Amino acid sequence: MTGRLILQDGTDLKGESFGYQTAVSGEVVFSTGMVGYPESLTDPSYLGQILILTYPLIGNYGIPKRELWESSGIKVSGLIVSSYIDTPFHHQSTMTLSTWLMKEKVPALVVKDTRFLAKKIRNHGVLLGKIVFRHDIPFYDPQAENLVAKASRKQVTRYGNGRKKLILIDCGTKQNIIRILIRKNVTLYVVPWDYDILKNRLAFDGIVISNGPGNPKTVKKTIEIVKKAFEFKIPTLGICLGSQILALAAGGDTYKLKFGHRSQNQPCKLSNSPRCYLTTQNHGYAVREIPSGFTSWFTNVNDGTNEGIIHSRYPIMAIQFHPEASPGPTDTEWIFDYFLEKI
């Protein structure tokens, strides 16, 4: 069946459907990653977004078992590719991408010229859009609401039994953050985005603020909780959205990027060092104003945006990229060890 991708600037493209046939609306973004579509589709940071994958072969290695996903299911609102492969070949494959999309009721279209769409978004900035079939629907802006409240878990969950105890504030966390921290031999308490860790008197040694979707300034309860923790100089690590939340809690400021960073090859330079790392990223906002007491830790080599901040005296730090990767390079996993050493 044929569907249509309609953008708010009037662009109207036909495409062949290989997913569930339902109309959806959201923010249209693109990722230039060559691999990792199962991880990307299950990344909660994509909540409310229609994702364009610019790499031309999608579906060729199928979908692995649920234990390897980054959340309980597909989080993108819709998917656009230039070439869908319905004959996967991989020893971990359990089903085709089309079967998975059908099960999860997510629409997907083959629109041949994804380069045209990526260039349009690069020039214009992210656009609202919709995938429609028989019936039209209005445009929807996911950035106008608190998406973290939708992405976060509803109750406290404990993992591991290590000597060091960490709180992970779930703003839409990827599962690989949890997997890696458990592997580092810690006791991990994963808590909802609005769970007051000080008021509820959990015993812990440090805080990790996870990635997540949307505008950080809408996550007011998490910002207030982190602000209280900051007063006690509790060791804290922010990841992606967590970096923006930490900056806002400490008195800094954030802003929306023109088209965001979504790929597995973003170069980030370590401050006061010639060392540069390849990183996985998925975010549409960044830190504009570094708060007092912090210095820049990493900088994006492509556009000069801030990629991390670190306190000059206390073990409080944040990075804009994903040290847990999944998908992508694992070059920056050492940041977890660095943070744990500082506790």
Image: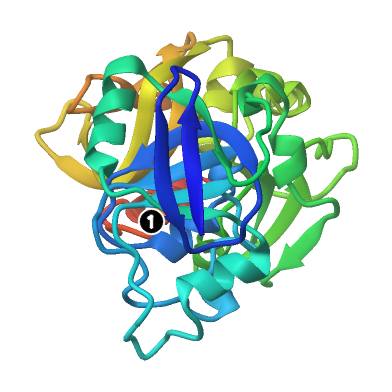
Bin the neighbour count of mark 1 within 10 Å (Cα to Cα): few under 14, some 14-19, many 20 and up.
Answer: many
Q: Give 5 or 240, whichever is nearer the viewer.
A: 5
In the image as oriented, which residue stretches furthest toward the left?
A: 274
For label 1, the residue is 325
In this image, 80 relative to 167: left or right?
left
Q: Give 193 or 263, whichever is nearer the viewer.
A: 263
In the image as oriented, which residue stretches furthest toward the bottom?
A: 91
Residue 38: percent from the left, percent from the top? 46, 65
Q: Secondary structure at mark 1?
A: loop
Residue in view at x 46 percent, y 61 percent: 39
Q: Amino acid at mark 1?
A: Ala
Residue 124 in view here: yes
Visual colour scheme? rainbow
Residue in view at x 38 percent, y 56 percent: 325
Residue 278: percent from the left, percent from the top? 21, 47
Residue 270: percent from the left, percent from the top? 22, 33
Residue in view at x 27 percent, y 57 percent: 329
Q: Number of labelled discs?
A: 1
- Image height of 95 relative to 101, above or below: below
* Residue 326, quarter of picture: bottom left
Q: Give 239 or 166, whichever is nearer the viewer.
A: 239
Residue 317 in view here: no
Residue 77: percent from the left, percent from the top? 59, 46
Residue in view at x 78 percent, y 25 percent: 221
